[in-house]
């Protein structure tokens, strides 16, 4: 009987060791894939408001304060950010947590919509071999918002992203169309175009300026254009480990959107940005 118990204990230990070894192999393989994938593109930080032309793996949380034309302050906690993963070579999967929106008015506070993004990098080269990146993405949004804090219907948004570096300076752009799966005549099909310029100072400081434009087609704002100029600065990245192979780091940023078009849903938007790189 004792021998049988010993045999069972040994088998359990072997299975536990095998499982631990498999987990370590999975984590090690994931880290190697992420490291090799990101080494083939420029090391530009993700812009504050616009999407990046490259891939990234991090957790991101933003706080945004918007001031409307009626001088009402609206807080957006999360700003539809979340976890960005590189589960496959040249591929990024984003799981974006619904933001919580606080209106400070008669409108009811509540959560916004849930979204996911699948991005594939079409071409790239790091700073030593051309410094550019080109990607395509598809965003899917589910109407999970409460009290009219989200969309009435689900939507998909195909987009193209591109960027080119010139020494310490880089320019990125993205073009996306938001296509509702429901009543397009009511919701419209807006086109979003972003242009970003960044410059690196002293290794980790990245002042930037963005132009964020939305062209409305159909819906209640048909024919209107909303445009913002958005200056800001990103500190990227503050390493959290002395191991040269470790990717652990912290990225911080602050910026301000300033309306420059006649039509705009809000006058200004202050963003406080925090990202944990892993």
Image (cartoon, helix red, strand yellow):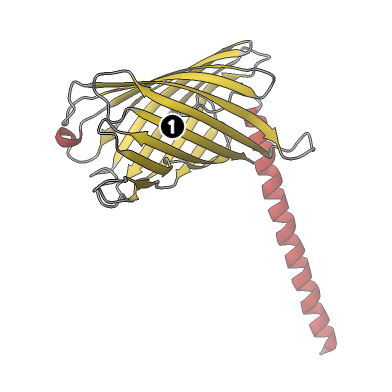
- In the figure, residue 173 lies in which quadrant? top left
Query: Counting other residues with Cα less than 10 Å from the Cα at mark 1, is it few (<14), some (14-19), or many (20 or more)?
Result: some
Report which residue position mark 1 lands on: 270
- In the figure, residue 140 lies in which quadrant? top left
Return the x and y of residue 263 as percentages of the image width and height.
Answer: 24, 23
Return the x and y of residue 64 as percentages of the image width and height.
Answer: 43, 37
**Eyeballing the image, is 264 above or below 88?**
above
Residue at the outermost bottom position? 1
Q: Which residue corresponds to the image point at 26% horizontal and 27% vertical from the top-left?
A: 190
Return the x and y of residue 121 as percentages of the image width and height.
Answer: 52, 27
Q: Which residue corresponds to the image point at 54% horizontal and 26% vertical from the top-left?
A: 54
Lateral position of residue 238 relative to residue 99, left or right? right
Secondary structure of residue under mark 1: strand
Lateral position of residue 145 relative to residue 22, left or right? left
- In the picture, which quadrant includes the N terminus? bottom right
Return the x and y of residue 228 as percentages of the image width and height.
Answer: 36, 21
């Amino acid at each position: 009987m004792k021998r049988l118990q010993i045999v069972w204990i040994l088998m359990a230990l072997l299975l536990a060791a095998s499982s631990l070894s498999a987990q370590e192999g999975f984590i090690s393989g994931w880290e190697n894939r992420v490291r090799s994938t990101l080494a083939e593109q420029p090391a530009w930080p993700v812009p504050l408001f616009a999407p990046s032309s490259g891939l990234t793996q991090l957790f991101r949380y933003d706080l945004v304060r918007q001031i409307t034309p009626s001088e009402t302050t609206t807080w957006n906690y999360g700003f539809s950010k979340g976890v960005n993963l590189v589960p496959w070579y040249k591929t990024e999967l984003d799981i974006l947590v619904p933001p919580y929106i606080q209106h400070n008015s008669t409108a009811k506070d509540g959560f916004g919509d849930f979204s996911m993004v699948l991005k594939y990098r079409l071409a790239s080269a790091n700073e030593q071999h051309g410094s550019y990146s080109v990607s395509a993405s598809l965003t899917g949004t589910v109407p999970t918002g409460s009290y009219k804090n989200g969309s009435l219907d689900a939507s998909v948004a195909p987009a193209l992203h591109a960027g080119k570096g010139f020494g310490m300076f880089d320019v990125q752009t993205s073009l996306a169309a938001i296509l509702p799966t429901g009543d397009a005549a009511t919701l419209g099909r807006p086109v979003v175009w972003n242009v970003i310029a960044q410059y690196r100072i002293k290794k980790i400081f990245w002042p930037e300026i963005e132009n964020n434009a939305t062209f409305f087609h159909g819906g209640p704002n048909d024919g209107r254009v909303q445009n913002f100029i958005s200056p800001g600065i990103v500190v990227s990245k503050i390493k959290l480990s002395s191991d040269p192979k470790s990717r652990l780091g912290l990225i911080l940023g602050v910026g301000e959107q300033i309306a420059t078009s006649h039509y705009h849903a809000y006058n200004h938007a202050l963003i406080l940005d925090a990202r944990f790189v892993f």
